[in-house]
Image (spheres, helix red, strand yellow):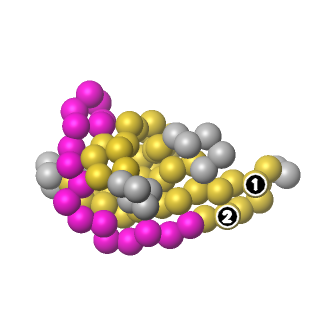
Amino acid sequence: MAKLLEKPEELKVSVNIQGVPLTLVRNGEAQRITKVYQHWRAVEQWLEKEILRNYFRVKTTRGLVCDIYRDMPTGCWYLSRIYD
């Protein structure tokens, strides 16, 4: 089962040269990403504003399986969904 966060949580994420996430920092705790299950891009129009995001479904060393995304215009990373 998955829990979609009501408000995405901002993260600090380090990436490799291809832009694939390697680590994330959540609540001050760094976690290494051990697996990338999926990667997809979302391009949408919302209230006359283009939304462009790169999503990744990942697993971390702490066993967290989640969807994170990078907002391409700002470069900020967010946690959007957590899987049980």
The picture places residue 17, in percent across and down from the top left corner, at 40, 56
Residue 23: numbered disc: none
* Viewer-side residue, 74 vs 62: 74
The picture places residue 11, in percent across and down from the top left corner, at 40, 38
Asked which secondary structure carries label 2, the reply is: strand
Cβ–Cβ under 8 Å for marks 2 and 1: yes
Residue occupied by mark 2? 43
Q: CA distance from mark 2 to mark 1?
A: 7 Å
State the residue at coordinates (55%, 43%).
75
Label 2, residues with CA under 10 Å away: few <14, some 14-19, many ≥20: few
Q: Decide: is 75 above or below 56.
A: above
Q: Which amino acid is tagged 1?
A: Glu
State the residue at coordinates (37%, 43%).
13
Looking at the magenta stretch, what is its main secondary structure?
strand
| Total residue callouts | 2
Q: Looking at the figure, which quarter contains the C terminus?
A: bottom left
Residue occupied by mark 1? 50
